[in-house]
Amino acid sequence: AQSVSQHNHHVILSEAASLELGCNYSYGGTVNLFWYVQYPGQHLQLLLKYFSGDPLVKGIKGFEAEFIKSKFSFNLRKPSVQWSDTAEYFCAVPTLGANNLFFGTGTRLTVIP
Amino acid sequence: DAGVIQSPRHEVTEMGQEVTLRCKPISGHDYLFWYRQTMMRGLELLIYFNNNVPIDDSGMPEDRFSAKMPNASFSTLKIQPSEPRDSAVYFCASSLNRQSRWTEAFFGQGTRLTVV
């Protein structure tokens, strides 16, 4: 079954540092991938999504992710983080044969001013 | 559209009491999901509906949990009787499946449940 794994549980960065959060998916045919963000005390919001086409996907707030099929990866990047990026980030993939989203365990990002 | 609306936002109840969480999906969406989020277990899918019909309830922890979707604009998640370990944030989400392709899921603000 399709699933994703996020190996970084907690990342701490200073403002202006570059960010890369890992997401690996299990193989399963057509791949649709999502990154969601959850700001403290809030609900999940979509950051970006990949369905097909250009493997470099640009999302909101300066985030981007690159789909690398050979590595089964969909890492999230941002060249320069801000304090307001402090949040939890979830990678997700639709489950094969079902119509629901499988979420990774999440990566907590703390940005220090 | 107001988005996915959940109520209440916060619920504090005593162990053994019945708790009902409510969700209004985005109009026109044909999928509705109930998730539970805890520090220990992260985000877990409890159950989801397609066109008001429960499709997969394998994530429902035990018989104390039940969910209904009597119509396209309303769903409930009930816990009876509630226990302290049910304390969590419960999210409802909805989505529209176009031509068997997944679009994004839109989440409600969540209900923070505390069972004392």
Image (spheres, coloured by chain):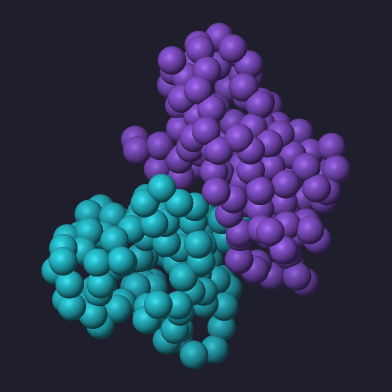
Q: Colour of chain B?
A: purple
Q: Residue furthest top?
A: B16
Query: Residue A63, located in which quarter of the rendered image?
Result: bottom left
Residue toward you, B71 or B98: B71
Q: Nearer the viewer, residue B106 or A90?
A: B106
- Residue at 59% x, 31% y: name it: B60
- On the image, the x and y values in percent for residue A76 come to 34, 73
Image: A40 above or below A16: above
- The vertical placement of A43 against B53, above or below, is below
Q: Is residue B16 above or below residue B92?
A: above
- Towards the viewer: A2 or A32: A32
* Residue with the most extreme right position: B71
**Residue positioned 35% across, 56% down in the render:** A88
On screen, residue A42 versus residue B55, left or right, reads left
Q: Is residue A111 left or right of residue A1?
A: left
**Is residue A95 visible in the rendered structure shown here?**
no
A32 shown above or below B111: below
Count of marks, rendered view: 0
Question: What color does chain A have in the rendering?
Answer: cyan
Q: Residue at x 25, y 82 (%)?
A: A79
Q: Is residue B30 left or right of residue B63?
A: right
At 58% across and 54% down in the image, what residue appears? B107
Query: In the picture, residue B28 is in which quadrant?
Result: bottom right
Residue B35: x %, y % from top left: 55, 42
Q: Where residue B22 appears, x then y in whole percent?
A: 68, 36
